[in-house]
């Protein structure tokens, strides 16, 4: 017999085009023009917060118990009433996402559905909210910036409800951001790939101007609370960066919090989200759903965020990279790799389910730091 010896270890054999998230990032960078890459990756100012968001995930260390590994941990969870195959949402990023791939949020929605998670769809998306809702059952949360007239905002929320969205992600933009890569590139979005929710038969284009140009007086918490209370859909508030705003959002009627600094794209030199998460969790107690984004780059980051107090993360640039690398397939592969790395992290930590993640999985030094920050 001349039989070939069978392979003993097939763990790393795969026919998949992308074996790691690194490969997806490399392809995205290769495919995009330098200008589009800068738009995708940029932060504001010196990009200190952009870097610190990921540095914060590099600091804590896991405490892995011996003889406690779990063979096949359950990565699924339920957040805001959504069943998720792992604790993640697609973050609402938009405005120029069709420059990464023409199918933009249509591709993202289809990939998210196949991967078993839900999608937040931005008001500035390059496809209309109805188009995005039409291609999957997971376009569930509509991101709405609170600017312009209260009636205009409520009308758009009504429109989102009619299209099947179930929650509103409230955001607020005080003034234009200082993004130097885009300034140096004299960046602008090409005509047909820009925001698509406004115009004839859709919403008033004046609202789009206000979204981009910041001319009218900015909103107060009182106004935001009035609209949240009148909103026909329950609201979560994005951009929570500290305990004070967490409290104000809850007082205003939010049913969940979204801890975010927009990936360092709004203002520089604000704290990393992972660093403030334990304080926010402590302040609002265990029952308020908390989503966190900004700096999540791999499956073990998701475990850290959950251990430190989040119920789920949201994925921004990672999804943009997947989209730019290979459209719907690239986003799907990104989600699959994240979920698998999260799965192996859970197992090594001795957790058979997401709900077993907690401060006890963080090694002593880092745990003390997190506990200290939650008791400040
Ligand atoms: C290209 C791009 C466009 C974005 N557009 C929006 C937007 O329209 N609305 C919004 O709420 N957040 C927007 N964001 C922020 C993301 O929703 C998310 O908060 C951020 O990407 C998280 O940080 P991370 O990319 O480091 O994970 C955008 C982010 C990127 C990268």
Image: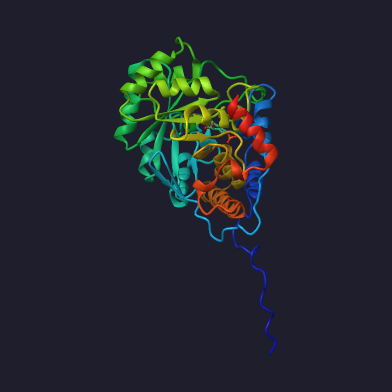
Q: Is residue 374 left or right of residue 251?
A: right
Q: Quadrant of residue 221?
A: top left
Q: Position of residue 170 (x, y in %)?
A: 43, 26
Q: Residue 43: in sight, yes or no?
A: yes
Residue 322 lies, with reference to residue 171, above or below; the image says below
Could you say which is closer to the camera, residue 372 or residue 73?
Answer: 372
At x 55%, y 49%, the residue is 330
At x 62%, y 28%, the residue is 373
Residue 1 lies, with reference to residue 154, above or below; the image says below
Q: Quadrant of residue 36?
A: top right
Q: Quadrant of the C terminus?
A: top right
Could you say which is closer to the camera, residue 103 or residue 122?
Answer: 122
Q: Position of residue 12 (x, y in %)?
A: 65, 62
Could you say which is closer to the camera, residue 260 or residue 40?
Answer: 260
Q: Is residue 92 left or right of residue 17?
A: left
Q: Is residue 308 left or right of residue 216?
A: right
Q: Quadrant of the N terminus?
A: bottom right
Q: Is residue 316 left or right of residue 56?
A: left
> In this figure, what is the number of numbered marks?
0
Residue found at the far bottom of this picture: 1
Q: Position of residue 156 (x, y in %)?
A: 35, 26
* Ligand 1's quadrant: top right
At x 40%, y 26%, the residue is 254
Color encoding of the figure: rainbow
Q: Residue 59: in sight, yes or no?
A: no
């Amino acid at each position: 017999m001349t039989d070939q010896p069978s392979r003993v270890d097939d763990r790393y054999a795969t026919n998949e085009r992308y074996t790691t998230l690194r490969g997806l990032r490399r392809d995205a960078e290769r495919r995009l023009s330098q200008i589009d890459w800068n738009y995708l990756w940029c932060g504001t100012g010196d990009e200190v917060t952009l870097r610190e968001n990921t540095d914060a995930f590099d600091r804590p260390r896991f405490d892995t118990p011996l003889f406690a590994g779990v063979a096949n941990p359950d990565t699924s969870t339920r957040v805001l009433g959504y069943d998720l195959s792992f604790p993640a949402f697609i973050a609402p990023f938009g405005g120029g996402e069709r420059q990464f791939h023409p199918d933009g949020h249509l591709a993202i929605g289809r990939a998210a559905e196949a991967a078993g998670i839900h999608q937040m769809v931005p008001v500035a998306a390059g496809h209309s909210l109805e188009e995005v809702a039409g291609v999957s059952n997971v376009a569930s949360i509509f991101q709405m910036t609170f600017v312009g007239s209260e009636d205009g905002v409520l009308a758009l929320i009504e429109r989102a409800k009619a299209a099947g969205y179930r929650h509103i992600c409230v955001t607020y933009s005080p003034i234009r951001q200082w993004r130097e890569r885009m300034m140096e590139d004299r960046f602008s979005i090409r005509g047909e790939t820009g925001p698509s929710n406004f115009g004839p038969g859709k919403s008033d284009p004046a609202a789009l101007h206000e979204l981009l140009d910041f001319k009218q007086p900015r909103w107060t918490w009182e106004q935001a609370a009035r609209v949240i209370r009148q909103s026909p859909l329950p609201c979560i508030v994005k951009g929570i960066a500290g305990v004070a705003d967490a409290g104000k959002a809850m007082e205003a009627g939010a049913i969940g919090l979204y801890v975010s600094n927009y990936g360092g794209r709004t203002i520089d030199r604000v704290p990393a989200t992972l660093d403030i998460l334990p304080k926010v969790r402590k302040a609002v107690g265990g029952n308020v759903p908390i989503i966190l984004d900004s700096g999540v780059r791999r499956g073990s980051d998701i475990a850290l965020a959950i251990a430190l107090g989040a119920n789920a993360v949201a994925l921004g640039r990672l999804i943009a990279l997947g989209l730019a690398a290979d459209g719907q397939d690239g986003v799907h592969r990104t989600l699959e790799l994240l979920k698998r790395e999260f799965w192996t992290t859970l197992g090594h930590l001795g957790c058979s389910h997401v709900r077993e993640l907690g401060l006890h999985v963080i090694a002593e030094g880092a745990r003390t730091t997190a506990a200290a920050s939650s008791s400040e």
